[in-house]
Amino acid sequence: MLVRLKVFRFDPEKDGDPYYQDYEVQAEPTDRLLDCLNRIRWEQDPTLAFRMSCGHGVCGSDGMRINGVCGLACQKLVESFGLEVRVEPLPVFPVIKDLVVDLEPFFQRYHSIKPYLIALSSPPGHERRQSPEDIRPLEDAIRCILCACCTSSCPVSQDPQTADYVGPAALVRAFRYLFDSRDESTSERIAMLDRQDRVWGCRTLWKCTEVCPKEIPVTKLIGHIKRRIYETKRESNEGEIRHAPKDEAGNGSWGEDSEG
Amino acid sequence: MVLDHEILIVGAGLAGLRAAVEASETADVAVVSKVLPTRSHSGAAQGGITAALGNEEEDQWEWHFFDTVKGGDYLGDQDVIEIMVKDAPRAIYELEHMGVPFSRTRDGRIAQRNFGGHTKGYGREPVKRACYVADHTGRVVLDTLYDQAIGRHVRFYGECYVLSLVFDDGRCCGVVTYDLATGGLHFLRAKVVLLATGGCGKIYRTTSNGFSTTGEILNLTFKEGIPLQDMEFIQFHPTGLFPLGILVSEAARGEGGILRNDAGEPFMERYAPSIKDLAARDVVSRAILTEVRAGRGIGGKGYVHLDLTHLGERKITEKLWEITSFARIYLGLDAVSQPIPVAPTCHYLMGGIPTDGDGRVRADQTARTVPGLYAAGECACVSIHGANRLGCNSLLDLLVFGRRSGKAMKDEVAGVKTLLTGRDPTKPVRERLAALTDREGPEKAHAIRLEMQIVMTDYGSVFRTEGALRQGIDAILALKERFSRVMVTNRGTSFNYDLMETVELGHQLDLCEVILVSALNRRESRGAHFREDLPQRDDQNYLRHTLAFCATGGPRIAYKPVVLGRFQPAVRAY
Ligand SMILES: Cc1cc2nc3c(=O)[nH]c(=O)nc-3n(C[C@H](O)[C@H](O)[C@H](O)COP(=O)(O)OP(=O)(O)OC[C@H]3O[C@@H](n4cnc5c(N)ncnc54)[C@H](O)[C@@H]3O)c2cc1C
Ligand code: SF4
Ligand code: SF4
Ligand code: FES
C-alpha cells in the first residue's frame, strides 16, 4: 500500500523555520514506521535525520511524535495508523535536526536523582539476599529504556513555567532505587525527592503512563514515591507536611490505584 | 581539535563499560560511541549470564569449562576458557553488588535457568546455569554499568564515529572521530586504546543485530596489518521471529518451550536425543533448516513453530515478558495461546581481533602484541567460543575480559609517556571523506548494501559449499567495484547518516570477503561452519585457528594452533 508521511523538517544550517515535507512510500501493513522512514532516507531523501539502533523497542533511540502521540517508530506498524501519518520530533527538548532532539537535558535530570545503588555496608563474598517478593515491585520500573517519551508527553514538563520539573523518566529510576531492598540511603533519597521540582511536580495527569512503550505504570510508581514520603514524614511527625496528596481535580488521589 | 585522555575506550556496550568502570579507579578514562551510550546493542541481550553458582542445583566450573569447549567444537583456547569459567561467580556477585536486580530463588539467591549446551556431569543432562533479569538482562546490566561509570566521572563522547586508528612508531596512540552532530573531525589522543565495538551482524539480510552493528572497526585493524581470527564462524541463532529476525531468546526453550514442525512433531528429539531443544545453537539451526528443506516447515514455508503454550500465562508474563511483547507487537499473536513462527537469524561473530587473556591485541601467530592496543567483547577473539558460542557465555566474556583489559590498561598507563606530536592525523580522514562527498557517480550505497546482505545470506550462512562460497566471493568483488563509483548525495554537516552509512558499507564489503575467503579455506565442518561438501570435522588438518591478513589481491590466510588442555577433542553429539 502507499503511505503518506508528513514529516517535520528543520536544518539549522539552512532553514530559518521548521516546515513539513510530504513523502510517499510503498509499505506492507506489517512494516514498522521505522521501515518507512528508512525507505525515505535510503531511496528518496538522504538528508532526513532520525535516530535508530535496535529496531525492536529495546534501545530507546527512536522516540518521536507520531500523529501527535509520543512513541517508538520501531514499534508502530503501518496498519496501526492507516494511509497517512504525521511524524514530528519529541516535544520539550530542543530540535537539533529534523526528528533528532538534544537529549542532554534529559540525561542530566536522570543523573540528578542518583541512579545507582547506595550500599554503605561492605558486600558479602556472595550475593546479597533478596526474595522474589522484594524484587517484584521493581519489575515494571526496570523495563525502562530511557526513551524520553513519557517526559516529552508530560504537561508539567511541557509548561515553560515548570520546566525545571525532573520528569517522569527520572522518577521511574528514582522509584527503582528507593524501593530496592538493598539500598541503604532511603532517607537521603526521600529528602532528595521531596521537592516541588521533583516528585511533587507531578500532577497525576497520566499522560506518561498512556505513552510508555514498555507499558510501565509510570504515574502509579510516582504515586508510590509520594505515599512513601508522606508516610515517612507522618511516622516521624516531622512537623508540617508540605504537600497534600491531591491531584489536579483535587480529589486526593496518589495515582497509585486506578489506571487513569 | 585534539583531546587528551589516558585511556580511550571505543564502544559503550558491556565490554567497554566494564573496562571503563575498572580503569577509572586510577586513570582518566573516556568512552567513545557512535550511538548514545545507553543505545548500545548489549542492551538487547535477553536471556542471561552464565556462572556455575549452583543456586538451583549442583553445578561445577569444570562442567561449565567442558560445555564451553565442546560447544565450540574444540576450537576454543582452553587456557582462557578456564580463566573465564573460574572467574564467573565473582563477576556475577560483583554485578549484584553494583545493583543489578537479578531475578531470585525462593530463598533469596540469584535465580538460574537452563540454556542451550549447558549441562551437568559433562553432558549428562541440562543444568540451570544462566543468571538473569527476566528476559531483559542486557538492558538492566547496561544501565547499571553506565550509571556506575557516570558515578566515576568517566567522560562519554556519544554519537562520535571512530574512522581511523592512529599509530606512532607502531604504538596505538589514539583515534580520529567524526562528530555526528557537527561533522567535525577530532583527534582523541590516549596512552592506550581499547576496542569494544561489538559484532557485524548487519552484513546479513536477516539478523538479530541492530542497525549500528556494522563492524567497521574490525576492518580498520585489518587494514593496519592486524589479522582477523576465525572469521568464518558466524553464529545463526535458531529462533529469530519470522520473518523479521528479531531474537526470541533461548530462554524460551530454557523455560520449557519446544520447537515443532508442520506436523506438530517436537523434531529436536531426532537431532539431539539427550538434550533435545537445548542442544548447541549450530545444531538446532541446522535441524530447523533441514526440516524446512524436507518440506516440513509450517505450511511448507521457511519457518517452524516455537511452542510456549504449555508453560502457562504466569510463567510467560513473569519470565518472558519482552519476548511475548515482540510477538504481540510485530505479529499480533498471543504467545500464551499461540505458537511463535521462528527461523534462524544471524546473531553473533565468534571470530574477531585476536587478543591474549588481558585484551592485548596480537600482531600475528606469535606471542607478539600491538603496543597500546587492546580489544574486548564481541569484536575480540580471545578465543573463548571457538567454532560456536554457547548461550549466555557472551555477556560473561564481556564482563570477565572487559574487566581484565581495564585492569591491564590502568597498570600499563602508569609507565607510558610518549604521545604523538607534530603530525595531524585528521587530514587523511578528511581527504577520504571528501573523496566520497565530492564524487559524482551512478551508484547508491543502499542498493549495494541490500545486494551484499542477500549475497551473504545466500552463499555464506548456515549451509556452505565450495561452489557457493566462490560465487559469493565473486559477487562481493563485483559489489566492491561498484562501491568505488558510489555517490553520497547528502553533503550536510549535521546528522549526515548517509555519509556514515556509506563509510560503514565500504568496511562491510571488505569484511564479507574476509569471511568468505576464511570459510572457503577451511575444508571441513566444525561448529557454525558447516560445509555440505565436507561434512566431517578434520582435526588432523583444521584443529587450528584461521588468521586472515590484509594483502594485495585479497586476504592471505594463515593458521595457528589451538591451545588444548584438560579436554581432548572427542565426538560432539548432544
Ligand atoms: C538480541 C540479542 C540478544 C542477546 N542475548 C544474549 C544473552 O542473553 N546472553 C549473552 O551472553 N549474550 C547475548 N547476546 C550477545 C551479546 O549481547 C553481545 O555479544 C554483546 O552484547 C556485545 O557487546 P559488546 O560490548 O562487545 O558490544 P556492543 O554492546 O554491541 O556495543 C558496541 C559499541 O561499540 C560502539 N561502536 C561500534 N563501532 C563504532 C565506531 N566505529 N565508532 C564508535 N563507536 C563504535 C557502539 O556505539 C556501541 O557502543 C545477545 C545478542 C543479541 C543481538
Ligand atoms: S502523571 Fe505526573 S509525570 Fe505523568 S504526565 Fe502526569 S504530571 Fe507528568
Ligand atoms: S518510563 Fe517508559 S516512556 Fe519513560 S523513558 Fe522509560 S520506557 Fe520511555
Ligand atoms: S530503534 Fe531501538 S527502541 Fe526503536
Image (spheres, coloured by chain):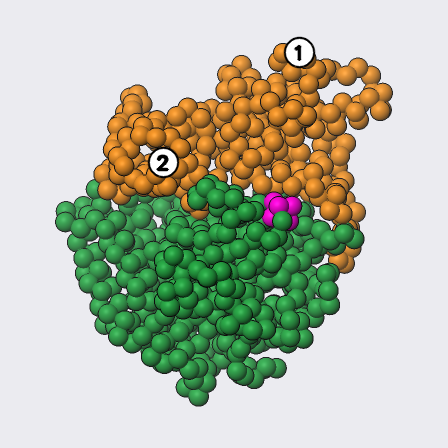
Chain colours: A orange, B green
Q: Tell me the quadrant of the picture where the N terminus of chain B can be found.
A: top left
- Residue annotated with mark 2: A78
Determine which of the numbered discs, if any, sits on residue B512 in the image: none
Q: What element carries label 1?
A: loop
User: At 65% across and 28% down in the image, what residue appears?
Assistant: A220
- In which quadrant of the rendered view does residue B60 lie? bottom right
Judge whether A65 appears above or below A58 on screen.
above
- In which quadrant of the rendered view does residue B292 lie? bottom left
Residue segment shown in magenta? B313-318
Judge whether B537 appears above or below B493 on screen.
below
Are callouts 1 and 2 both on one chain? yes
Determine which of the numbered discs, if any, sits on residue A250 in the image: 1
User: At 27% across and 53% down in the image, what residue appears?
Assistant: B450
Please give the chain letter of the residue carrying mark 1. A
| Helix, strand or loop for the magenta stretch, by majority | helix
Q: Which amino acid does label 2 sit on?
A: Val
Q: Is residue B440 magenta?
A: no
